[in-house]
Image (cartoon, rainbow, N blue to C red):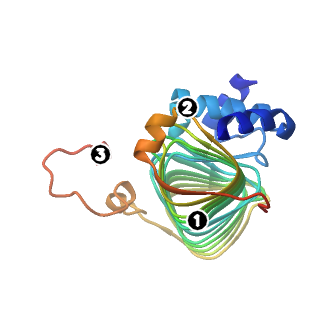
Amino acid sequence: MPEEIRRLARDGNALQPEAASSISSGLSIVGKITGHGVLTIFGHVEGEVRASTIVIAEGAQIEGEVSAEELTISGYVKGTIHANRLNLNSTAVIEGDIFHRILVIEGSDASMKSARAFVRWNRNFG
Amino acid sequence: VVFAKAKGNESDSNQVGASAQEAIRRLTRDGDASQSKEASSISSGLSIVGKITGHGALTIFGHVQGEVRASSVVIAEGAQIEGEVSAEDLTIGGYVKGTIHANRVRLGGTGVVEGDIFHRTLAIEENARFEGMSRRNENAIDMQSLAQPNGKGNDTAVSFNPVS
């Protein structure tokens, strides 16, 4: 399974175009990204981002509102975040409000040091 | 407390895509996904309204309204683009409404283009639909602006751009 996902991510997901999107580190998008499925961002996005599952990889930079059911952040986000389940990795840097149902912080020391976040717990998200 | 709560809910919220998500998460965290940094893909479930610029390969299955610029662009069957498309290599199997600038253009059998094509080489397959003007240019695209979308950093003596 991991091998397949790796291949899908690398090849731009030729096998299941429905399933996954990827924005490489060489790419910048200024505007609004909306849809469903998995979206992995390595590059720069200025604007609103909405998808079912979003992975913001290390090195990625997002300026704008991010909304997802499942959201994993290893990069930089400046903007409001809405997620049912938010996974913050130790390299994540957040500037903005976070609205979530479940929040997981990995490597909590590093995260909290670098993150300037206002975390609010929402029972009735969505 | 938050951590324990999250761990406890994890099994409950597990769905079909959870294992895939977990794998992607692991790949991202481990830096194993560095291979995918080169290629971009916009799935059929995704719409982008705005400007997409950069280098590397970009495959579009979804909808884009706005300018698209990359080194190598594939507009797959089912994809819809409304806006200007610029690339070194461009393959079209979907629908494009707008002006096209590319050194090499391949219009596939499922491709539909409504707009003008500026190209160095142009291939049109059987059953493709093309409404517009085609013009041949030795340099169909502005390579400088393609390689450096911000148009900055020209003053530095060291060039990191292999494309001349």
> Is A46 left or right of A125, judged from the image as shown?
left
Q: Farthest front residue? A: B1
The label nearer to you, 2 versus 3, is 2
> Is B163 left or right of A31, judged from the image as shown?
left
Helix, strand or loop status at disc 1: loop
- Dot label at residue B105: none
In the figure, B49 relative to B77: above or below?
A: below
How far apart are labels 1 and 3 at the CA level?
32 Å
The answer to whether residue B10 of the structure is visible from this angle is: yes
Residue A55 appears at what percent x and percent y?
Answer: 62, 45
Crowding at dot 2, Cα within 10 Å, few <14 / some 14-19 / many 20+, comes out as some
Q: Are marks 2 and 3 in contact (CB under 8 Å)?
A: no
Q: Which residue is mark 3?
A: B161
Mark 2 and mark 3 lie on one chain; the one further toward the N terminus is: 2
Q: Are marks 2 and 1 in contact (CB under 8 Å)?
A: no
Q: Quadrant of residue A83?
A: bottom right
Which is nearer the eye, A25 or A57?
A: A57
Residue A21 appears at what percent x and percent y?
Answer: 67, 48
In the figure, B95 relative to A72: above or below?
A: below
The label nearer to you, 1 versus 3, is 1
Q: Name the residue at 49% across, 44% down.
A: A92
**Whether labels 1 and 3 share one chain:** no
Q: Type of residue at label 2?
A: Arg
Q: Name the residue at 66% across, 38% down.
A: B1
Q: Chain of mark 1?
A: A
Residue B126 appears at what percent x and percent y?
Answer: 77, 56
Q: Which residue is mark 2?
A: B29
Residue B23 appears at what percent x and percent y?
Answer: 69, 29
Q: Which residue is mark 1?
A: A65
Q: Type of residue at label 1?
A: Glu
Q: Chain of mark 3?
A: B
